[in-house]
């Protein structure tokens, strides 16, 4: 991972910023926002996720929880 750029397959720690019925809005240590579909966690919780896709134009990512 270079700077704030993320790649598919990267495993990173994120903090939950909002929990919705469809998933969790999260933020990486470098401030990049993302969405984890599904999952259940409290706001402020730290989770380990695997990046599925990084949108360079929008500077955001989608991810899945790491078991």
Image: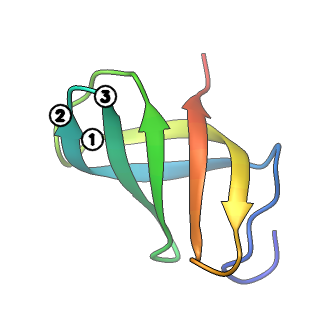
In-front residue for pair 15/36: 36
Residue at x 81%, y 78% (from the top left corner): 2
Question: Which mark, by number, is residue 60?
Answer: none
Q: CA distance from mark 2 to mark 3?
A: 14 Å
In this rendering, the label closer to the viewer, 2 or 3: 3
Q: Nearer the viewer, residue 65 or 60?
A: 60
User: Which of marks 3 and 2 precedes in the sequence?
Assistant: 3
The C terminus - image quarter: top right
Q: Residue furthest top?
A: 67
Residue 51 in the image: above or below residue 22: below
Taking the spot 25% from the left edge, 28% from the top edge, the residue there is 41
Q: How is the image coloured?
A: rainbow
Using the image, determine if residue 63 lies above or below residue 28. Answer: above
Judged left or right of residue 17, residue 3 is right
Q: Residues within 10 Å of mark 1 (few under 14, many from 20)?
A: few
Mark 1 or 3: in front is 3
Q: Position of residue 10 (x, y in %)?
A: 78, 49
**Left or right: where does residue 1 sit relative to residue 45?**
right
Q: Are marks 1 and 2 in contact (CB under 8 Å)?
A: yes
Q: Mark 3 Cα within 10 Å, few/some/many (few <14, many 20+)? A: few
Q: Position of residue 34 (x, y in %)?
A: 47, 56
In which quadrant is the N terminus drawn? bottom right
Viewer-nearest residue: 53 or 65: 53
According to the picture, the residue beneath numbered tag 3 turns out to be 22
First in sequence: mark 1 vs mark 3: 3
Q: Position of residue 61 (x, y in %)?
A: 59, 58
Q: Is residue 7 left or right of residue 11?
A: right
Label 1 belongs to which residue?
45
Disc assigned to residue 42: 2
């Amino acid at each position: 991972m270079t700077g704030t750029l993320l790649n598919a397959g990267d495993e990173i720690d994120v903090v939950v910023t909002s929990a919705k019925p469809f998933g969790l809005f999260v933020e990486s240590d470098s401030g990049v926002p993302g969405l984890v579909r599904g999952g259940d966690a409290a706001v402020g919780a730290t989770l380990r996720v695997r990046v599925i896709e990084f949108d360079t134009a929008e500077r955001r990512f989608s991810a899945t929880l790491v078991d």
